[in-house]
Image: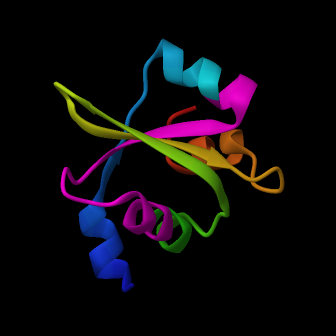
Amino acid sequence: MRVEDASRIIKRPYSTEKTFSLIERENKLVFIVDEKASKRAIKQAIEILYDVKVDSLNTANTIYGKKAYVKLSKENPATDLATRLGLV
């Protein structure tokens, strides 16, 4: 997968009070992603764009679009990526 393809899949990070607690407690970040993207494509896109390792991924279709709940590996703290993305 190329970086251009990855940037089309991942639209933007999603932040609310609930997502901040996910970052701190569960090492998870939430992104709004392309509605047609598969879990495998989302995982690859996150790993390519942000140079992190993804442990698990869940998706949910909402009125805001398709959300991806991304749990990062222990060696990649979600707080570090959230800071790089300007969420914290």
Residue visible at 61% across and 37% down in the picture: 28
In the picture, the quarter occupied by the C terminus is: top right
Camera-nearest residue between 71 and 40: 40
Camera-nearest residue between 59 and 20: 59
Residue that extends furthest to the top in the rendered view of this protein: 17
Camera-nearest residue between 41 and 4: 41
Q: Is residue 71 above or below residue 46?
A: above
Left or right, 74 with respect to 29, comes to right
Residue that extends furthest to the right in the rendered view of this protein: 75
Left or right, 19 with respect to 78, comes to left
Magenta run includes residue 50: no
Quarter holding residue 63: top left
In the picture, the quarter occupied by the N terminus is: bottom left
| Magenta-tinted stretch | 23-45
Residue visible at 83% across and 56% down in the picture: 75
Left or right, 76 with respect to 84, comes to right
Residue visible at 64% across and 30% down in the picture: 23
Residue visible at 63% across and 44% down in the picture: 71
Image coords of residue 31 (percent x, y)? 39, 43
Q: Is residue 68 above or below residue 53?
A: above
Image coords of residue 46 (percent x, y)? 49, 62
Q: Is residue 13 above or below residue 24?
A: below
Q: Is residue 10 above or below residue 14?
A: below
Disc tally is 0
Image coords of residue 14 (percent x, y)? 38, 34
Image coords of residue 26 (percent x, y)? 71, 30
Quarter holding residue 82: top right
Magenta run includes residue 43: yes
Q: How is the image coloured?
A: rainbow
